Image (cartoon, rainbow, N blue to C red):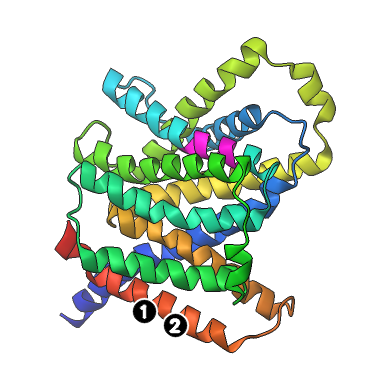
């Protein structure tokens, strides 16, 4: 009985630990994506990244390519939603500061919660909405380095408006990953979903540039730093993070899954404190405490809301 109890606790905690790793990978993608040469096509960069990641997964474990029409449509939709989010992020970073986009990224769980309610996957709860707001406020304190005036002074421009749409696409991906599986349109196989959605999404995203893009100019502007950045994003923030997301999408509510985006600012802050890149402020302790407490309460609500 004791061993079974331990196993049960591990099964409950494991998705949350995996999502913490996911948040760290997502946090690292902002500065890496901002380092690409601005002249490179954002669409083609994401397409190459997705196809490479999907091909690596397929080589590790070959999957049958004969799928039903609704299955391929689901994989393609998931790939396009996530690919669209990354394309928008690349473009928005050329017009806005990473801090501005990171602040807007906090809207993602609210979009996911709204979509999951529209699809009747979750019921509205003032308590849940309040907890999401509480955790968002804690994340903003951390993100602004305890200077909320920096958030309030953000000028809303083209990049910010564009990235808001990207957050909606990411929220759609987080929600529809679970929805398509629940409807049995695709198999409940995180590995297959990750692999095939990357391949399908990448192939569709590559078509416009292959037909109308200047591939010679892309190759001429592509540098060694771009290659290293592309490899990092391919292996870690595509292949590994998407696989983690697919596994946890089968175990966590969409709003809870998306709420892990709030952990990225905290992980950034802890890294800066460890490396002595920022000074300690007492307000950080309150913000981190609120963030963790809010997550604890959100996790306890899981079975009540689904």
Tag 1–tag 2 contact (CB < 8 Å) = yes
> Which residue shows up at 59% across the image and 16% down it?
208
Which residues, given as a range, are shown in magenta?
A: 82-89
Report helix, strand or loop for mark 2: helix
Q: Residue furthest bottom?
A: 282
Report helix, strand or loop for mark 1: helix
Residue with the mark numbered 2: 289
- Crowding at dot 2, Cα within 10 Å, few <14 / some 14-19 / many 20+, comes out as some
Q: Indicate the position of residue 51 as horizontal and vertical percent values.
A: 56, 30
Queried whether the magenta region covers residue 88, the answer comes back as yes
- Crowding at dot 1, Cα within 10 Å, few <14 / some 14-19 / many 20+, comes out as some
Q: Indicate the position of residue 115 as horizontal and vertical percent values.
A: 29, 44
| Residue 293: image tag | 1
- Res 250 visible: yes
- Res 247 visible: no
Q: Main secondary structure of the magenta part?
A: helix
Queried whether the magenta region covers residue 199, the answer comes back as no
Q: Is residue 115 left or right of residue 83?
A: left
Figure quadrant of the N terminus? bottom left
> Which residue shows up at 55% across the image and 82% down it?
284
Q: Quadrant of residue 12?
A: bottom left
| Residue 65: image tag | none
Residue 18 against residue 44 in the figure, above or below? below
């Amino acid at each position: 009985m004791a061993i079974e109890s331990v196993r049960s606790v591990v099964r409950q905690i494991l998705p949350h630990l995996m999502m913490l790793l996911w948040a760290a990978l997502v946090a690292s993608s902002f500065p890496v994506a901002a380092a690409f040469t601005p002249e490179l096509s954002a669409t083609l960069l994401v397409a190459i990244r997705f196809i490479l990641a999907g091909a690596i997964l397929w080589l590790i474990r070959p999957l049958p390519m004969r799928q039903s029409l609704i299955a391929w449509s689901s994989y393609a939709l998931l790939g396009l939603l996530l690919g669209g989010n990354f394309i928008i992020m690349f473009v928005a970073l050329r017009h806005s500061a990473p801090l501005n986009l990171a602040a807007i990224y906090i809207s993602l769980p609210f979009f996911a919660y709204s979509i999951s309610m529209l699809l009747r996957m979750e019921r509205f709860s003032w308590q849940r909405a309040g907890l999401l707001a509480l955790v968002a406020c804690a994340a903003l304190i951390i993100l602004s380095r305890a200077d909320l005036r920096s958030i309030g002074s953000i000028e809303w421009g083209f990049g910010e408006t564009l990235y808001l749409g990207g957050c909606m696409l990411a929220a759609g991906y987080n929600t529809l990953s679970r929805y398509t599986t629940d409807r049995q349109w695709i198999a409940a196989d995180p590995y297959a979903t990750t692999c095939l959605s990357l391949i399908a999404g990448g192939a569709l995203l590559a078509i416009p540039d292959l037909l109308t893009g200047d591939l010679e100019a892309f190759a001429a502007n592509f540098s060694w730093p771009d290659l290293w950045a592309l490899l990092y994003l391919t292996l870690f923030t595509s292949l590994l993070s998407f696989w983690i997301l697919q596994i946890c999408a089968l175990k966590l509510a969409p709003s809870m899954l998306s709420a892990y985006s709030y952990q990225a600012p905290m992980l950034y802050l802890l890294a800066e404190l460890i490396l002595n890149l920022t000074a300690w402020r007492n307000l950080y302790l309150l913000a981190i405490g609120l963030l963790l407490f809010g997550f604890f309460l959100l996790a306890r609500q899981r079975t009540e809301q689904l």
